[in-house]
Amino acid sequence: MIREIISIVVAIAPAMTGPAMTGPAVASPEPPQLSCPGKGYYSDRDESRVYYWCEETGAVPSRFMCGYGTVFHENYEVCDYAQNVPRRRDRALPGS
């Protein structure tokens, strides 16, 4: 009986955990048409959860995505709840 209960719990446990909410999810590098204007973090013009890290001027940026329920905050360079983030995108990566 205990083995059957353990088998059921093990079978349904992954479905109960939901999506992971720890840290940013790393996405694939962006296509070569995006070029870094300088070293730093940049937001995406259209997708508020997406941001980029540029290592140096002219490099291909690395693309990241904020965790579920958060968006990129340009002023603090962190992912934060949307109600805490201004809607302006002053540091959007050109071409994004």
Image: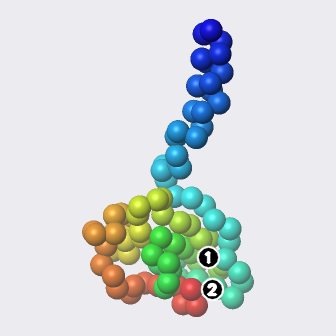
Which amino acid, by three-letter code, is at mark 2? Ser
Q: From this viewpoint, which residue is outermost toward the front?
A: 1
Q: Which amino acid does label 1 sit on?
A: Pro
Q: How crowded is mark 1: few (under 14 residues within 10 Å), some or many (20 or more)?
A: many
Residue 95 position by quadrant: bottom right
Which residue in the rendered view is the most extreme toward the bottom? 95
| Separation of residues labelled 2 and 1 (CA atoms) | 7 Å
32 or 69: nearer the viewer: 69
Determine whether label 2 and label 1 are within 8 Å by CB: yes
Q: In which quarter of the image is the C terminus?
A: bottom right
Query: For mark 2, what is the residue?
Result: 35
* Mark closer to the chain start, 2 or 1: 2
* Rendered image coloring scheme: rainbow
Point out residue 92 in the picture as x, y percentages from the top left corner: 47, 85
Residue designated by label 1: 61
Q: Quadrant of the N terminus?
A: top right
**Callout 2 secondary element:** loop
Front-most of residues 65 and 8: 8
Using the rendered view, name the quadrant where residue 70 is placed.
bottom left
Q: In this view, does 90 lie to the left or right of 14?
A: left
